[in-house]
Image (spheres, rainbow, N blue to C red):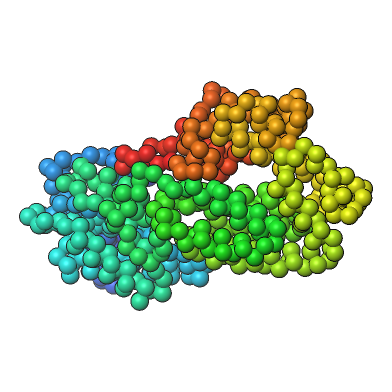
Amino acid sequence: MSRAKRNDPMTETAPDHGRQAREAPQGRGADAAAGVPGTVFRIPAIYRALLEEHLAYRRAALFRELLQGDRVMRPSDWREERERLRLPSRSEPFCVALAEVDGYVRLAARYSPRDRQLLKYALTKAASELADASGLKLWTEWLESRRLGMMFLRSRFGPGRLEDAAAVCERLRAWTAQHLGFTVTIGVGDPVPGPQRLAASFSQAEEALQAKIVRGTDRVILYRDIRHVRAGSPLGERWPEIRDIAVLFRKGEPKWRDAFRRLFQDERLRDLSRDDAVTLVNMLVVFLDREMTEFVPADTAGWWKTRTEPALRGIAAGMESLAEAREAFLAALRECEEQLKRMRKARPSAAVFEQMREYIDANYANPDLSLAHLGGLFGLSPKSVSHLFKEQSGVNFVDYLARVRMEQAKRLLLTSDEPIPGVAARVGYVHAVSFNRMFKKVVGITPGEFRKRYRMKGRFFKGGTLYTSIQEQPGVRWGVRSDRIFVPDAVRFPETVERSGVRPDPGGHRVP
């Protein structure tokens, strides 16, 4: 068949019916001819259906082009396209909103593809009818399986108020929860003067929708309500709190729960972007994983790596809100906590070891700290102390002490102008040469090189957005390095982090 025949529905359909008429048995006479008029009469209906399908495709393509900024329209261009694509007459777009189905993965598992299409149709139909009832017109297209794009159209002389669009979105949210058995979260961009600025409103709606991870699901979020938070992020001040949670959890101290709740109940977290919220949760996993693999016995580390850590990673990957992640994290950590208690009870020497470890954490700067020193304090022989460390922590005493000292040394190198010999003395080394040798063994580079690479402009534990305050050095990629350098303030999760530290935002903002 030629290209012309394939593309023209009339050319493709008519010859078939003509051939049927010519090939009909002559003996049937009037009976054979009687079916031809009915078939011919159906052709206009078939053509209209194909035409409407073609228009729907073109409308969807234009919708995406306008929102993504691939096509900038003047008002005159809009009027021409409006008539050509049979959009509401005498109307102009003024605002974009995005409705996202909450928990779509669970919804997809519960309903068949056909049922999901029916639900999406019902949501689309309800949105248009609610807009009509409010005196607005709505152009909707599904942009993704879980996201419905909504372009609000005002009459030619209408005001196009954000409050009117937001009211429609709120009624749609309530109707969906009541009648469809699932919820939606809707982000609403600011009004724009015409079709040429729709991409800006769309970008704002996307940004507002991202805020659901901290503001919660089943709600309408206006960009204007979160605009003020784009200038900065309180994340940098959270790292010490996260580390304290990890340390308390590893030690089995119940206070970790209170610290955990305080972290997630902080009002400043409401201002986090989605990227920052994901970073926060992932860094909690990073700190916990470090404590639970490097400073615990082998059986504890094994349980953590096979049970708890994979569970936490899964929660972080699939979370839709911080509140949801908080409850799931608590459940997983409580289960692990109970298992750790059982393991500790099976090791009678665990209490003594914890006391030794607390003593080391408080007295690492003492150059006389040794197996003999600890043995004298706790009434044990140096050999017994060595065996206890190996049994309880999975590493020997010398390695454990070196790790504690190197962590403190890294902090001092990043936050002070103390000369290298001074740093060495403050972490328990009499001779700087011994300190340099141990630092390179544990960290992988010398103290001087470490300071040069990761030197911070701000303070380590006070104020500022820490992960954007690292001084870049040529050829250095930020992230978790294979040599086990652990600089949490320079880490963004996942490990492949752009060296620039910021990425451009379609709305013209700079997002950390």
Q: Residue furthest top?
A: 474
Please name the residue shown 58% across and 42% down the image. 488
Residue 435: image quadrant is: top right
Indicate the quadrant where residue 164 lies: bottom left
Establish if 264 lies above or below 451: below
Q: On the rendered image, what quadrant is the N terminus found in?
A: top left
Using the rendered view, name the quadrant where residue 29 is placed: bottom left
- In the rendered structure, the answer to whether residue 276 lies left or right of residue 400 reads left
Side of 74 where 370 appears, left or right: right
In the rendered image, the vertical position of residue 338 relative to residue 59, given as above or below? below
Residue sitting at 62 percent across and 26 percent down? 419
Residue 3 appears in the figure: no
Q: Residue furthest left?
A: 157
Coordinates of residue 183 in the picture (x, y in percent): 39, 69
Q: Residue at x 56, y 24 (%)?
A: 475
Q: 135 or 54, which lies in front?
A: 135
* Residue 209, position as x, y percentages in the image: 37, 55
Whether residue 341 is visible, yes or no, is yes
Looking at the picture, tell me which residue is in the foreground, 375 or 397. 375
* Image quarter hosting the C terminus: top left
Q: Nearer the viewer, residue 370 or 408?
A: 370
Residue 439 relative to residue 211: left or right: right
Query: Is 185 rendered above or below residue 281?
Result: below
